[in-house]
Image (tube, rainbow, N blue to C red):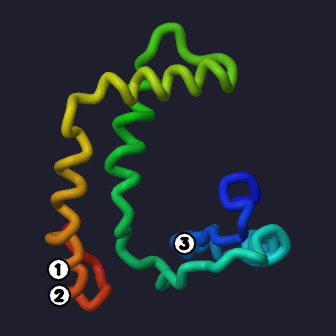
Amino acid sequence: MCIVHSDGLGQFQQDNATPHASKVATKCLQEHFSDYRHFHWPPKSPEMNIIEDIRDPLLHAVEKRSPPPRTPLDLLTALQDSWCEFPPGYLQTPVESMPRHFASLLRARGGPTRY
């Protein structure tokens, strides 16, 4: 956060899963990110971030690479190369699903959804 948002305008979001809300994690956030705003996120709420729809296939593509990345620079290169191998419009499906996702969450009043 200090590097990406050195102006202090960054906002930190975490999902309040039990490990993230532990005393140790909370103390770390207070000590290191006290200058940044935190999104309120209900504990154990449905995931509304499409990053997992992107992260999982990307990590799977990197895991299949031969030879596997051995250094941070190798990993960065493998991630970039794998990202470039995704077909054009790959992100279109998860992005277009968001209105249905939000509508489902609203109908469930923040409770579990089929997503």
Q: Of the residues under marks 3 and 2, which one precedes in the sequence?
A: 3
Give the residue pinned by disc 2.
107
Left or right for 26, reference 70: right
Left or right for 42, reference 4: left
Q: Residue furthest top?
A: 67
Q: Residue furthest front?
A: 7
Q: Secondary structure at mark 3?
A: loop
Dot 1 surroundings within 10 Å: few (below 14), some, or many (20 or more)?
few
Q: Could you tell me residue 92's position as x and y percent?
A: 19, 48
Q: Could you tell me residue 58's position as x and y percent?
A: 40, 34
Q: Could you tell me residue 98's position as x and y percent?
A: 22, 66
Residue pictured at 73% horizontal, 52% vertical: 3
Left or right for 104, reference 5: left
* In this rendering, the label closer to the viewer, 3 or 1: 1
The image shows residue 73, relative to residue 36, as above or below, that is: above
Q: Of the residues under marks 3 and 1, which one precedes in the sequence?
A: 3
Give the residue pinned by disc 1.
103
Three-letter amino acid code at disc 2?
Answer: Arg
Q: Is mark 1 in CB contact (under 8 Å) with mark 2?
A: yes
Give the residue pinned by disc 3.
17
